[in-house]
Image: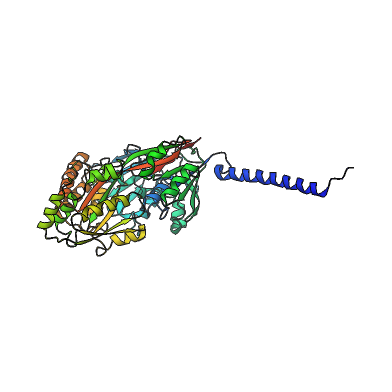
Amino acid sequence: MKRIPASKLAIAMILILSLIATACSSDSSKGTSNEGNGAPNLTIALAGEPEGLDPQNSSDNISNMITYQIADNLVTFNQDMQIVPQLAESWMVSDDEKSWTFKLKQGVTFQDGAPFNADAVKTSFERVINENNKLTRYSLLGPFIDHISVNGDTEVTFHLKNPLGPFLNNLAAPGSAILSPKSIKENPAGIDKNPVGTGPFKLKEWSTGNHLLLEANPDYWGGKPNVGTLTFKPVPDNSARVLMLETGEADVILPVPTSDIDRLAKNDQLAISSRQTNRVLYIGLNNAKAPLNNVKVRQALNYAIDKETLVNKLLQGRVKVATSAIGEKVFGYSNVGAIPYDPNKAKQLLQEAGVIEGTTLRFVYSSNVPQDRQAAEFVQNSLQQLGLKVELRQLELGTYTDTIKDPESFEMYLRGAAPLTNDADYVLRALLLSGSKNNYNGFANPEIDRLLETGFTVTRQEEREKIYADLLKRIKEEAPWIFLYEDMAHIGMRKNVEGIGLLATQTMDFRKVIKR
């Protein structure tokens, strides 16, 4: 037998080990993208991560987007923002318009195996409408429901205290998502980290600050999704998020900075999908303090801002000048017209109000939307041309939220109003009704209060439209805020990704997504 030298044996062993390592690495790589079942992974880079995952206790867009994949509602919005059935097959309303009965889908189960039925619906809603639970979405329906009754497994009835104009729209909002009765009874405190619904995806893991992983629900009543997993990554830096898309580290990014849209659209490996949202960017004015407690001063600030230049030059026409306090896709919208740019009129009104040159206005905005900074700086410059001093501060979302709740901490704040119910009531009553906890402006007007309450309780949609048309005209006259523009949502994706739905509420829908 011929003896092989030890040195050659060593080399051979190194080569063999290298081949094994390469094979293992390849298998491992496939595991991260296919989760072992042949269905691809989709990686989505977002500007941040969710505040929490309890749909009944969350209010930020990212939380809403992720829980939308996990939990379903009785009714939902289609791509045209029309109400359509989801877990309900049909519904009817009583003659006095105070009792709504829903016939439920059969054969649906929650992701933990619990059956979906009328008792499950009752349990889920009784959690959110119980004021003692102190859930964020209590105000959506809690004050207005007297009680809920069931008729067997397939019918549930909501008994309202009074008729409610936006009732169906409120049922389609994220806060009305239906959660597993098992999770509610056994671990209600854990829902924020591990929600259980009937949706197409279920939570697998959440590494805070790193990634959140959803996996396909193989038993989804609407059909198993085409992708095996969704990996959401928080990437606040715009440039880093765009680079991830260009290199293929991310399949999808939201939002796409407006300054990068044209360049990315020219890349034959990428696609940009855009749609008008129902978000109106506005400047809230502190109506409770001088000088903004004077309507002439508020009107002056409106005349001082050239919204056409802001939209068409600074933001490259990627948004639309707002013509009302709510977006044109929202129920109740009417075009009352933007207040025109007229700096001379602005100066005249300030003089009539006795505002002296050098008056300081503290202006705060959040860092979580990239283009908000451009708008804030544009407004700052516009007002300083009138002789006002504008102290601009960019704040992290949590600090920003705390600041605008304290009327002594600001004169102006920049904020987006995006009604998750796609109904005028959701934004206007919350932000302008006297005494509302979300009325950060400190605005109070008895006639506007009356119209807000009437629009809320009237159920005939034609009558509601007339009420809101009158209301929006009065809001323009009183100028409690400055409405700037209607936002657009821009998704960047690899060309091999298709079928992502995008609602006007800026929520992506991955039910029909395909990765080729």
Location of residue 293 (image quadrant)? bottom left
Identity of the residue drawn at 21% across and 54% down? 383
Nearest the camera: 51 or 388?
388
What colour scheme governs how the chains and residues are painted in the rendered image of this protein? rainbow
The image position of residue 355, as x and y in percent, is 14, 60
Location of residue 507 (image quadrant)? top left
> How many labels sit on residues?
0
The image position of residue 9, as x and y in percent, is 79, 47
Say which quadrant the N terminus sits in: top right
- Residue pushed farthest right? 1
Visible residue check, residue 235: yes
Identity of the residue drawn at 41% across and 39% down? 264
Identity of the residue drawn at 50% across and 40% down? 227
- Residue pushed farthest bottom? 408
**360 relative to 354 in the view: left or right:** right
Visible residue check, residue 453: no
Nearest the camera: 101 or 257?
257
The image position of residue 35, as x and y in percent, is 56, 44
The image position of residue 308, as x and y in percent, is 23, 43
Nearest the camera: 495 or 305?
305
Q: Is residue 121 above or below residue 225?
A: below
- Residue pushed farthest left? 352
**111 relative to 440 in the view: left or right:** right
